[in-house]
Structures are given as C-alpha cells and as structure tokens.
Image (cartoon, rainbow, N blue to C red):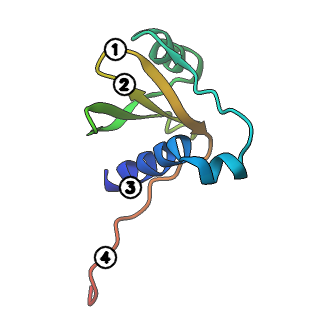
Amino acid sequence: MRTLLVLAALVAAFFMAAPASAQMFPRTVRIPCSGPDALPNMLARDYGETVTEQGIADGALVQLWHNPETGSWTILLVLPDGMVCALAGGGDWMVADPPQPDGL
C-alpha cells in the first residue's frame, strides 16, 4: 500500500511540477479523464482489471487497477467531484515481497 502511495505521489509531482520541468518537458501532457463510469468500465471490460489497492491522497481517491493474469495495470485518480483520471498504466506488474527486518 505504501508503495502505491509513493508511486502515485511521484506521478502527481511529475504532472504538477512547476517551471523547471516545463523547460525540461516543453510539450503539454494531457491526462485522460472521464465521468465516474467510463474509465473504470473500460478497464474492467477491455483489460479485465479490478481495483486491488486504493488510498486517499489530498482528498482524492488513488486506485490501482490490476489484472494478475496479464500483468496489466492502471493508476486512477478519482476526484471529489466524481471525475476519474488515468495517471499511468502499463504491463508486467509484479507484487514485491515486503522488506524483512534485519536478522530474519
């Protein structure tokens, strides 16, 4: 869960970065957003993904959608007004083993 929140924070920081990144990345980044049902329905129907992790960040819901059979994954941001935005997605998602304390 902590890994998901760190990943979501990094993605959000990338998209909201100020002038320094504007110089490094001069093009506009468009984030696909929709009403409350379109993106979730598409992920379930077309990719077989379901919500596997979620948490609250700055008043919005961050969700990890994942299909364990194919490895496809998507991170959605659900805003308080119901708008849903896809922040990132890809393939080959792997569940990491939790770190073990020293001495185990």
Q: Residue 100 bears which disc, if any?
A: 4
Q: Tag 2's secondary structure?
A: strand
For badge 1, the amino acid type reads: Gly
- Mark 3 element type: helix
Among numbered discs 1 and 4, the one appearing first in the sequence: 1
Query: Mark 3 or 4, which is nearer the eye?
Result: 3
Q: Determine contact: label 1, label 4, CB under 8 Å.
A: no
User: Could you tell me which residue is drawn at 45 percent across and 17 percent down?
Assistant: 40
Label 1, residues with CA under 10 Å away: few <14, some 14-19, many ≥20: some
Q: Earlier in the sequence, mark 3 or mark 4?
A: 3
Q: Nearer the viewer, residue 40 or 70?
A: 40
Q: Amino acid at mark 2?
A: Val
Q: Earlier in the sequence, mark 3 or mark 1?
A: 3
Q: Position of residue 50 (x, y in %)?
A: 42, 27
Mark 1 vs mark 4, CA separation in Å:
39 Å
Residue lying furthest front: 19
Q: Residue at x 65, y 33 (%)?
A: 29
Mark 2, residue position: 78
**Residue displayed at 40% across by 16% down:** 83
Which callout, 3 or 2, points at the residue further toward the start of the chain? 3
Q: Distance between the Cα atoms at labels 3 and 1?
A: 25 Å
Nearer mark to the viewer, of 1 and 4:
1
Left or right of residue 84: residue 80: left
Which of marks 2 and 4 precedes in the sequence? 2
Q: Are marks 3 and 2 in contact (CB under 8 Å)?
A: no
Mark toward the viewer: 3 or 2: 2
Question: Which amino acid lies under the numbered mark 4 shown in the image of this protein?
Answer: Gln
The residue tagged 1 is 82
Q: Foreground: 17 or 103?
A: 17
Q: Answer whether labels 2 and 1 touch (C-beta < 8 Å).
A: yes
